[in-house]
Each structure stands twice: as C-alpha cells, then as structure tokens.
Image: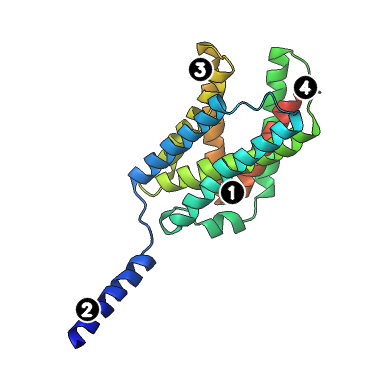
C-alpha cells in the first residue's frame, strides 16, 4: 500500500511538472502557424462574400474577422511561446513609442506618397468614409504588426539574426496580400510591383520593431501610412 501511494504521488508530480513546463518554440510551429493563418485568410477572401450586405454591416463583420483571425491569432502564439521570443510580450506592449523616430517616419510617408501622387496624377482620394478611418486605418496597423512583427519576426529571430528574421517575415507579409490581389483581378505586373513595394514596407516595419522593441511605434506608423495612401 505504501509503495502504491508513493507511485501515485510520483505520477501526480509528473502531471504537475508537465503542466508547468512552458511550450518550446520550434521552426515547425512557425511554419504550421503561417500555413494555418494563410489558409484561413485565403478562405476569408475567396469564400466569405460580404459585398451583398449593408456597407456598415459588411465593415463591422470584416472588422470582427480581422480581430479574431489577426489580433487574437497573434496574441495566442505570442503568449504561448513568450519565453522563447526575442522581445517579450510585456516589453513590446509596455515600451513607449519614440516620438522623434515617428516624426521622421511621418515626413517620409508624406514625401513618398506625394511623389507617387505626382507620378500617377490620379487626384486626391476624397471618398474616404468615417468607418474607413475607424476600421481600416486605425485597426489594421495594430492587427498586421501584431501578427508579422510581434509574432513571426519575433519568433524567427529566436533561430537566426534579427536582420534575417526581418527579411523572412517581410516575405511572409507580402505573401498574405496575394489572395486579396488575385481576388481583385490584379495582373502579373501589378502583383510584382505591389510585392516589391510591400516587401520594402515590411522591412521598414520590421526595422522599427527591432529598434524600438515596441509594437506601438510600428502600429502607429503603419496606420499613418494607410491614412496617407487613402487620402493621396
């Protein structure tokens, strides 16, 4: 009886240890998480048509899908593998954005987009509605930065240098745009041109995340960039 009690006690200790052991990050985890994320987003783009709904209902549902599939996706993986990430969850959300860097980035965003405006000569985009500002501009920045910088860049940097992680995560950032571009009928040339532009932006967002060790600086700049592209 004594031996049985000792054996049961040993099993209980093993269960407690298994519960307390943190999940170990692996390259397989990163790859599988991206496949799941890309597959889910591709399904959303091609199989969930919101165009037949009232525009406000459509945007609200779109926002909720973004919230669940982007923000909660990132939060789940960041918290689950927090101890193995290059920048911890606490650090990335509590570190304040650098205002001086943001101002320089704002100037760059305005100058670049004004240059594009004069090249294209399409006029200013004055049709932006309030929900475009609230849902698209103010939310997409934090959603995309959480997934691709907070999770993917951060996780990949556990296995390689931050620069290489930025190169890889920026490529993943480009690829997630492909379902939308294809669904909108973009041609090969348009996709290639957009891929180059988005890859460059991804590198900038990644560089901001690496330098600031904060999710907020990149998210604010990302939202500002989207706002400028809406207007110009």
Residue 208 can be seen, yes or no: no
Q: Secondary structure at mark 1?
A: helix
Would you name the residue on which mark 2 appears? 7
Would you name the residue on which mark 3 appears? 192
Residue at 45 percent across and 56 percent down: it is 80
Q: CA distance from mark 3 to mark 1?
A: 28 Å
Crowding near the residue tagged with mark 2, few <14, some 14–19, many ≥20 C-alpha atoms within 10 Å: few
Q: Position of residue 45 (x, y in %)?
A: 56, 27
Looking at the image, tell me whether mark 3 or mark 2 is earlier in sequence order. Answer: 2
In the image, which is nearer the foreground, mark 3 or mark 2?
A: 2
Q: CA distance from mark 2 to mark 1?
A: 48 Å
Q: CA distance from mark 4 to mark 2?
A: 72 Å
Marking on residue 175: none
Find out whether the residues at labels 3 and 2 contact each other: C-beta distance under 8 Å.
Answer: no
Residue at 68 percent across and 46 percent down: it is 100
Q: Secondary structure at mark 2?
A: helix
Residue at 19 percent across and 87 percent down: it is 1
């Amino acid at each position: 009886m004594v031996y049985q009690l000792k054996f049961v006690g040993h099993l209980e200790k093993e269960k407690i240890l298994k519960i307390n052991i943190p999940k170990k990050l692996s390259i397989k985890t990163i790859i599988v998480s991206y496949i799941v994320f890309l597959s889910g987003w591709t399904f959303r783009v091609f199989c969930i048509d919101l165009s037949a709904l009232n525009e406000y209902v459509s945007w609200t549902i779109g926002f909720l899908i973004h919230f669940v599939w982007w923000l909660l996706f990132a939060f789940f993986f960041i918290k689950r593998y927090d101890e193995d990430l290059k920048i911890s969850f606490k650090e990335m959300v509590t570190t304040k954005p650098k205002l001086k860097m943001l101002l320089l980035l704002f100037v760059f965003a305005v100058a670049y987009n004004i240059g594009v405006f004069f090249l294209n000569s399409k006029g200013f985009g004055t049709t932006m509605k309030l929900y475009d500002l609230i849902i698209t501009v103010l939310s997409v920045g934090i959603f995309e930065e959480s997934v691709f910088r907070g999770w993917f860049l951060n996780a990949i940097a556990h296995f390689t240098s931050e620069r290489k992680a930025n190169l890889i995560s920026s490529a993943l950032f480009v690829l997630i745009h492909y379902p939308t571009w294809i669904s909108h009928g973009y041609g090969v040339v348009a996709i290639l041109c957009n891929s180059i532009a988005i890859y460059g932006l991804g590198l900038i967002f990644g560089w901001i995340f690496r330098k600031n060790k904060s999710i907020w600086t990149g998210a604010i700049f990302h939202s500002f960039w989207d706002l400028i592209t809406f207007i110009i």
